[in-house]
Image (cartoon, rainbow, N blue to C red):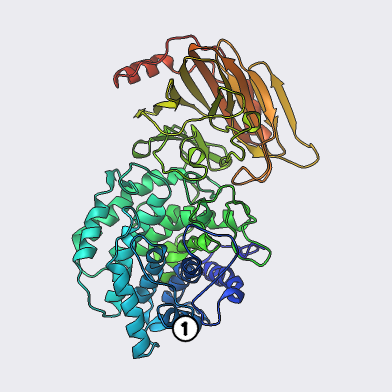
Amino acid sequence: ANPLFGNPLKTRDDLAKAVIDLFEPLLPYFSEGGARVRLGAAGAIFDRAAADLEGFARPLWGIVPLAAGGGAFPHWDLYRRGLANGTNPAHPEYWGDLADRNQRLVELAAVGFALALVPEHIWEPLDDSEKKTVAAYLLRARELEFIDNNWKFFRVLIDLGLEGVNVAFDHRKTLAYLDELEGFDLGDGWYRDGPVRRVDHYIPFAMHFYGLIYAVLAKGDETRKDRFRGRAQTFAGDIRHWFGPDGAALAFGRSQTYRFAAGGFWGALGFAGVEALPWAEIKGYYMRHIRWWSAMPIADRDGVLSVGYGYPNLFMSESYNSPGSPYWALKFFLPLALAGDHPFWTAEEAPQPEFPEPVALKQAGMVAMHTPGNVVVLSSGQQHDKMLGANEKYSKFVYSTRYAFNIEADDRNFSAASFDGMLGLSDDGVHFRMRETLEEALITGDLLYSRWRPWNDVTIETWLLPENPWHVRLHRVATPRALSTIEGGFAIERADFNADRSDVSDGRAVWYGQTDVSAIVDLSPNRRAGHAMSPIPNTNLIHAKTLLPQLRGEIGPGTTVLATAAMALPSRENWAKALDNPPACPRLDEVERLFREKGVRVPAFTLHP
């Protein structure tokens, strides 16, 4: 049912076909007046009319560049009719009145993008009355308050559309928002997404993506446009470490249901003419990404994209995900607006460069390790909002392009919890806590530190050390009472009919899957029990059923130090040698010295192989 399946996705024409193939399953769900697209019965935090607008507007992110680049889209009459009716308060398909911080403000950005780039298709054929109705709706929208994060770009995009069709307005609010958006700059090409220092995929597929569109479509403001281009140029050198050699993106943070929007940054570089890396390398990241998604079961039987990631899955969704939300993925197709002779399209794809050493991503508080078939990213943790699965999406110790992560499905069943890439703790054997928010987080070189409190009276300090293909976790736990602990490795795909094999012993657990192996080893003097777990189905983002090695044990009151090594690899050639050579001892002297310079003391104890 994946509309991309069978498309080789090698050329510009292949991608143009992909846009049409992704759009056509939506046609039966357009309302008679064209303004509403209702794709399912599941709800979101906003009203149904706004959700229907989302279903209408989000496909434009792919349709508009397709048309701007000369591609044929046969349904512009449907979009023109829907735009006129949806903005008309007297029409039964009216999208509804606008308000501050309202979802409609998000979706109207796609309308602004369309007016700016292809007015000949969506604006000029309207009659004068319809133009006045559409313009009045957009003018009301731009006067409202947008959420203090990447949403501020939506006013900018609406204004680019109004400007493109010669509708007059006061630009002062636009410029104010642009100044505030630039105030989110963290340095090294990174932004924070709002007042809280949080970095996730909204940095590439929102902050940079919209900034590069502005750099192309805005009139004047050349100095700011140069800053947007310059930050994107710098950022590319870091964000490439969020992509695996097979094209998979790092599953990290919220809004994973937007899927291949994660690769939109590479296309936006092409759209803005920013050769941040050689065009061949940029094109490689871009094309591998969409091919990876073409093999995944990401659509329902009718070809409509599902809420989920690697397969339909509401466990990992957010409250703002309606059935139309996944179509933000079509932002990926922005470079279709470029002519076929642009160097973005004429370049031959280049493979991902080799990175034998760990790479520190300072502003993200991360360290990336390139392992065979995978990129492993150690994380000191991010601040985050309260949302479904927030701890799992932002606060695990390690994330991976190949193995993604699990969402806990039952917070009252400690023994059934995954804790992949995480340390879980319980004081009653039923409920559990894990790393959530941080009291302190540090990065020095390629080493990470964080201090966190699962309960007010329990303090844990965690150090993360890369030892490719392994990584080492050190935890110093200070607790006034006894606690049960479970620590997990990487979740790998599980086969049917018990075709996989486990190897469990004191201080060690290994799962041998059909294509991958996952291992976790206790380096502590008092070794925890190895446990071969099969997590609750549909908890992993990529695979519906997984295998997970764990360490389980008890710690008493006082201060206890835990030390863990974990890794996962594809193919026997890679993992047989790694299993025979787990880390004997991390660079403890170096860790002590480097963190002492930051005022942090590493626990003094002897690690055992």
The quarter of the picture where residue 219 lies is bottom left
Seen at 30% across and 80% down, the residue is: 165
The answer to which of 382 and 93 lies nearer the viewer is 93
Number of marks in picture: 1
| Image position of 539 (left or right of 127) | right
Q: Return the residue at label 1.
A: 81
Q: Is residue 102 left or right of residue 392?
A: left
| Amino acid, disc 1 | Arg
Residue 179: x and y in percent read 22, 56
Vertical order, 60 against 547 (above or below)? below
* Position in image of residue 200 (x %, y %): 42, 46
Look at the numbered disc 1 and give the secondary structure of its residue.
Answer: helix
- The residue that appears at 44% across and 52% down in the rendered structure is 281
Q: Is residue 545 visible?
A: yes
Q: Residues within 10 Å of mark 1 (few under 14, many from 20)?
A: some
Q: Quarter of the image containing the C terminus?
A: top right
The percent position of residue 384, horizontal first and vertical second, equals: 41, 41
Q: Residue at image x 61%, y 18%? A: 553
